[in-house]
Image (cartoon, grey):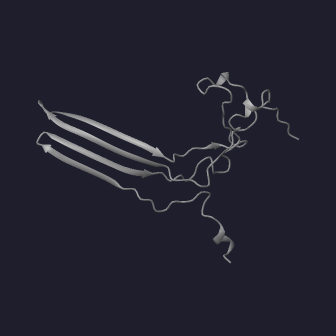
Amino acid sequence: MLPAMARVPRGFSQTHANVFEPRVGLAWRVNNKTAVRLGGGIYHTRALLNDSTLLGGNPPIQFKVGVTNGVVDQPAGATRADFPLVMTMQDPVFKHPTAYTWSASLQRELPLDIVADVTYVGRVGAYLQRERNINQLQPGTVQRNPGVNINPPMSIG
């Protein structure tokens, strides 16, 4: 049997130590005044320390604001919600936040030593880091229970 320390995980979520991040670039001189350039790559983020996994990232130590039955652009018009508290957590099966980027450009020398450059740059993200409100009511709860008070007064004691 392994000692207790050997059974303890190295972190809350899986650490991805070896990640393949290829980058490629290509430049082609069409003639003495025109060039075409292409490039692309894959980039990852290592989420190390954040409010979701550190002690104190949730109430009552650190307050978080949530908008219930309102519009984020006009939070004053929302209903006051003492409960449920906004409690967040990081998924233990945490995939690397990944970005795929690419670019293509055409450069042309014009008269009077002017250079025109037309470039398209693209980027798409996958598995982006987010926090999930673990106290969020399930969709349809209010509709299935008309008249239910989703913000009941809290009593301590």
Residue 135 in the image: state x and y as whole percent: 71, 41
Q: In which quadrant will I find the C terminus? A: top right
Q: Residue furthest top?
A: 77
User: Residue drawn at (59%, 48%), measured in percent from left and top?
Assistant: 50
Q: Name the quadrant containing residue 21.
A: bottom left
Q: Residue at x 68, y 24 (%)?
A: 78
| Residue 122 x/y as whole percent | 37, 40
Side (left or right) of 30 relative to 6? left
Q: Is residue 81 visible?
A: no
Q: How many marks?
A: 0
- Whether residue 42 is visible to the viewer of this picture, yes or no, is yes
- Residue found farthest to the front: 144
Q: Residue furthest right?
A: 157
Task: Identify the residue shown where x is 81% and y is 32%.
Answer: 152
Classify residue 54 as left or right of residue 16. right
Percent x, y of residue 116: 20, 33
Front-most of residues 99 and 46: 99
Residue 34 left/right relative to 78: left
Identify the image quadrant of the N terminus: bottom right
Horizontal arrangement in the rendering, residue 146 relative to residue 88 (left or right) = right
Name the foreground residue: 93 vs 157. 93
Residue 17 position (above or below residue 155):
below
Position of residue 110 measured from the top left corner of the image (x, y, whole percent) = 14, 32
Image quarter of residue 154: top right
For residue 102, which quarter of the picture?
top left
> What is the residue that sits farthest to the bottom in this orientation?
1
